[in-house]
Image: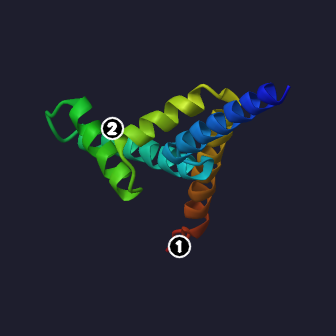
């Protein structure tokens, strides 16, 4: 009985240790939402402005913009990819992250429209 309990305890400790190591490599939900928001913003910028003015490859332009976003957030592409795969395997959490990014976009767009001053008629 004691041996079984000891074996069970060892399995739990090892499992928890592996989870904590994985947690260090995975971005938290708020950070992931911020990165995804900036990635989508960078993609939109690249498609709207950069690709119209150049003959460069679309993928290379998007890669450059993606690298800029990751640098701003001080994360590696491996960390982002690992985090994305982790959240992709947890659809409810990923949905929450994407909703947060979308809510931020709507909020910021609304703020921009509200700050505009109407054009005065002469």
User: Quadrant location of residue 78?
Assistant: top left
Q: Are marks 2 and 1 in contact (CB under 8 Å)?
A: no
Q: Residue at x 46, y 34 (%)?
A: 82
Q: Residue at x 24, y 38 (%)?
A: 61
Query: Which residue in the rendered view is the most extreme toward the left?
Result: 55
User: Quadrant location of residue 55?
Assistant: top left
Q: Observer-nearest residue: 86 or 42?
A: 86
**Residue 103 location, x and y as percent?**
65, 49
**Residue 37 location, x and y as percent?**
51, 47
For mark 1, what is the residue?
Answer: 120
**Residue 46 location, x and y as percent?**
31, 42
Q: Nearer the viewer, mark 2 or mark 1?
A: 2
- 48 shown above or below 34: above
Position of the N terminus, as image quadrant, is top right
* Crowd band around label 2 with a 10 angstrom C-alpha radius: few (<14), some (14–19), many (20+): some
> What label sits on residue 47 in the rendered view?
2
Q: Is residue 108 left or right of residue 44?
A: right
- 12 shown above or below 113: above
Query: Which residue in the rendered view is the most extreme toward the right?
Result: 1
Label 2: which secondary element? helix
**Residue 38 location, x and y as percent?**
45, 49
Q: Earlier in the sequence, mark 2 or mark 1?
A: 2
- 104 shown above or below 56: below
Q: Is residue 14 left or right of residue 56?
A: right
């Amino acid at each position: 009985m004691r041996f079984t309990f000891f074996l069970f305890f060892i399995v739990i400790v090892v499992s928890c240790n592996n989870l904590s190591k994985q947690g260090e490599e995975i971005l938290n939900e708020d950070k992931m939402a911020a990165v995804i928001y900036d990635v989508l913003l960078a993609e939109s910028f690249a498609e709207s402005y950069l690709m119209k003015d150049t003959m460069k490859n679309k993928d290379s332009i998007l890669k450059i913009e993606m690298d800029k976003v990751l640098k701003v957030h001080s994360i590696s592409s491996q960390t982002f990819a690992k985090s994305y795969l982790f959240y992709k395997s947890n659809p409810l959490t990923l949905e929450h992250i994407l909703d947060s990014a979308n809510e931020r976009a709507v909020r910021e767009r609304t703020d921009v429209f509200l700050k505009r001053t109407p054009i005065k008629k002469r």
